[in-house]
Amino acid sequence: MLKADLHCHTVYSPDSCNRLDWVIRRCVATGINCLAVTDHDEIEGALKLKKIAPFPVIPGEEIDTGQGEIIGLFLKQRIRPMQGMEDTIGEIGSQGGLAYLPHPLSICRNQPLDVGVIQGLLSKVDIVELFNSRTRRESADHAWLAEWIRRGGVVISAGSDAHAPHELGNVLIEMDDFSSPQEFLRSLANARFSMKKTSTFLRAVMNHRVRSIIRLCASSSPGRPAGHL
């Protein structure tokens, strides 16, 4: 049985202080044995972690399309941002990946989702994130989301959206092992979720400025170049 977190960030995201060795250490401590790394507009950290982690790592990317963010899972190459939602989802599919819609109702994001655009593309989305441990405020316009889920055809997920080590483990997804993206989808459809919110206090403490300081200190450690272990 896997215990997975399917939405997290490393120092390869400009707003995260999660060094790769810190991610491994935290995952081992919390029992996470499957991780999807979804850095902002970048895949290098995911590919590096996949090589060194003692557990399966799913290479992903959280892509700013200019019409909201979409995550690609099981990617092989970086996808360029700001191409629009439809073309980005198309590129995810061309790599044999899965399209994962994160925090669809969040209204505290720099890249708000264009609901009108995504409603025309719902048939191309594989996974929707109904719980995000860092989401503070959600839109009241959720009828479209409820109807989409009611109709079926999409798999529900949750994510810690971890940008700092203490946030890894805020979501644990218990699911069967898999050997392909389609097996992953079937396993996720029958998964069990354990979830908790990041407290308002911790979100305030781990704001962008503080995370930047931690990143600077981490990168200046002896033998630890910026962006590496």
Image (cartoon, helix red, strand yellow):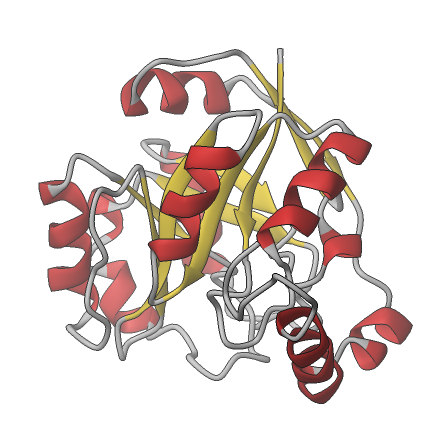
Count of residue discs: 0
Q: Nearer the viewer, residue 189 or 221?
A: 221
**Position of the N terminus by quadrant:** top right
**Position of the C terminus by quadrant:** bottom right
Q: Is residue 74 left or right of residue 225?
A: left
Residue sitting at x 49%, y 12%: 177
Q: Position of residue 21 (x, y in %)?
A: 64, 47
Q: Position of residue 223 (x, y in %)?
A: 61, 61
Q: Position of residue 181 (x, y in %)?
A: 30, 25
Q: Residue furthest bottom?
A: 209
Q: Is residue 197 left or right of residue 69?
A: right
- In this rendering, the answer to whether 98 lies above or below 186 is below
Q: Nearer the viewer, residue 141 or 81?
A: 81
- In this rendering, the answer to whether 52 lies above or below 218 is above
Residue sitting at x 64%, y 60%: 18
Where, by quadrant of the figure, is residue 140 drawn?
bottom right
Residue sitting at x 59%, y 43%: 158
Q: Nearer the viewer, residue 201 or 225?
A: 225
- In this rendering, the answer to whether 208 lies above or below 7 is below
Q: Residue furthest front?
A: 223
Residue sitting at x 80%, y 60%: 198
Q: Nearer the viewer, residue 158 or 75?
A: 75
Q: Position of residue 153 (x, y in %)?
A: 31, 32
Q: Is residue 216 left or right of residue 186?
A: right
- In this rendering, the answer to whether 17 lies above or below 162 is below
Where, by quadrant of the figure, is residue 64 drawn?
bottom left
